[in-house]
Amino acid sequence: MFKLDGKVALVTGGSRGIGRACCEALAEQGATVIVNYVKGEAQAREVADAITAKGGKAEIVGFDVADAKAAETAVEEVAKRHGRLDILVANAGISIDGLLLRLKDEDVDRLYQVNVRGSLACAKAATKSMMRAKTGRVIFLSSVVGEMGNVGQTAYAATKAAVLGAAKSIAREFASRNITVNAIAPGFIETDMTHGMTDQMKEHIVRAVPLARTGTAREVAAAVVYLASDEAAYVTGQVLRVNGGMYV
């Protein structure tokens, strides 16, 4: 089950954290994986090398999703080079925290530019290729805070909520072309972004998780593999929550 042999998958922000786990998991199921990065070329190459060392297929491509024009061009070139693009995992994103009264306009603009416009630009380019093939999978990475909110993350939560709305709308637009569009909303996942938190901060968050632990990037990646597979062909416009029960 969940085999992806012959499929081509592009993962934005694939050089670390959840993105890296997605790249590795998709490759393990047989997909050729395109690892996107912005500045971490060495990290992206490390991911690709790790995949090929295990017999998988991977390559790297650098572009900034915040530059919509460059992102669309890069995604279209990937599809053209491989003759197809079956799976897009729109994972690239940033977090800038701050209480509402302290939010800077430039931070809000940056969050929307990367998290929302960047995801939409990649989806726009990817679906062009998928429409010709009359099949495809688009998977957006949102967040639990996009559904439940969180103190000090007003702008970030707003962008992740926007991604959910976009996924549902795009799913309706492309269903007739056999293209499924879904979102994954991870909860408190151990990544580079959480390593800077104190043990006290982590303990406070974990107390709100019924499973009483943090999640792993591999657990999020497993959900991505499912949604990318043929087994999920009848699943579209949905939000798959990988949050340990933090929000239900």
Image: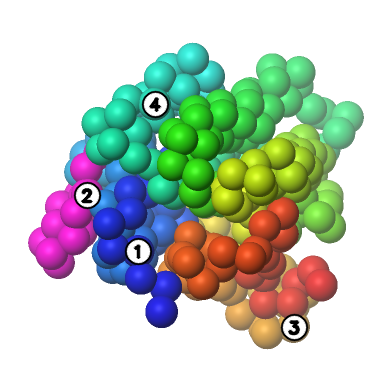
Q: Which label's residue is closer to the chain start, 3 or 2? A: 2
Can you tell which of label 3 and label 1 is closer to the viewer? 1
- Check disc 2 and give the amino acid type: Ala
The residue indicated by pointer 2 is 58
Viewer-side residue, 206 vs 184: 184
Q: Which label's residue is closer to the chain start, 4 or 3? A: 4
Residue 183 against residue 167 in the figure, above or below: below
Q: Secondary structure at mark 3?
A: loop
Residue 241 appears in view: yes
Tell me the magenta residue range. 46-61
Q: Residue at x 57, y 64 (%)?
A: 233
Coordinates of residue 131 in the picture (x, y in percent): 52, 37
Residue 100 against residue 206 in the figure, above or below: above
Q: Which label's residue is closer to the chain start, 1 or 4? A: 1
Q: Which mark is residue 76?
A: 4
The answer to whether marks 1 and 2 mark residues whose Cβ atoms lie closer than 8 Å is: no
Can you tell which of label 3 and label 2 is closer to the viewer? 2
